[in-house]
Image: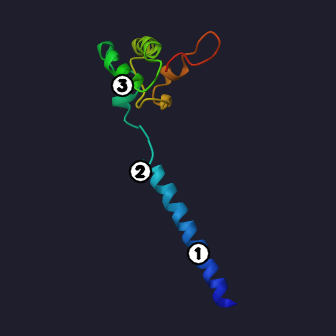
Amino acid sequence: MAVARLLVVFILSLIAISMLQTLVMASHGHGGHHYDDKKKFGPGSLKSNQCPSQCSRRCSKTQYHKPCMFFCQKCCRKCLCVPPGYYGNKAVCPCYNNWKTKRGGPKCP
């Protein structure tokens, strides 16, 4: 009986340690996408002549390439920033993230 309890405690501690390790790794940017490099992606990180290439990257995986490029470049010219990746990550560029359509939806892809 005591051995069974000891075994249960041991297994539960291994699970707890594994969960803690996952949390620590995620908080340090390992295994997730944390874009803390404000100079590379943040507000004002681009010049307007860099917008077409950054928007091509951003819109490269969408099936709606033309509208994505149109709105991305419009947002880039205003915000001088395009978030990293193909989708999401908009928190890195607040201007890009917070610009809304008249209906309240996101303006920038």
Q: CA distance from mark 1 to mark 3?
A: 46 Å
- Residue 53 in percent (x, y) is at 31, 19
Q: CA distance from mark 2 to mark 3?
A: 23 Å
Whichever of callouts 2 and 1 sits on the residue coming sooner in the sequence is 1
The answer to which of 96 and 71 lies nearer the viewer is: 71
Outermost right residue:
1
For the image shown, how many numbered marks are present on the structure?
Answer: 3
Residue density around tag 3, few if under 14, some if 14–19, many if 20 or more, within 10 Å:
some
Q: Where the N terminus falls, by quadrant?
A: bottom right
Q: Is residue 84 left or right of residue 47?
A: right
Write the residue at 48% across / 32% down.
Answer: 89
- With respect to residue 40, does 47 lie above or below? above
Residue at label 3? 57
Kind of residue at disc 3: Arg
- Tell me if label 2 and label 3 are in contact, CB under 8 Å: no
Q: Nearer the viewer, mark 2 or mark 3?
A: 3
- Residue 63 in percent (x, y) is at 46, 21
Whichever of callouts 2 and 3 sits on the residue coming sooner in the sequence is 2
Residue at label 1? 11
Q: Nearer the viewer, mark 1 or mark 3?
A: 3
Kind of residue at disc 1: Ile
Q: Is residue 72 left or right of residue 5?
A: left
The answer to which of 71 and 82 lies nearer the viewer is: 71
- Residue 14 in percent (x, y) is at 54, 71
The answer to which of 103 and 44 lies nearer the viewer is: 103
Write the residue at 43% across / 50% down.
Answer: 31
Residue at label 2? 30
Quadrant for residue 85, please give it.
Answer: top left
Residue density around tag 1, few if under 14, some if 14–19, many if 20 or more, within 10 Å:
few
Kind of residue at disc 2: His
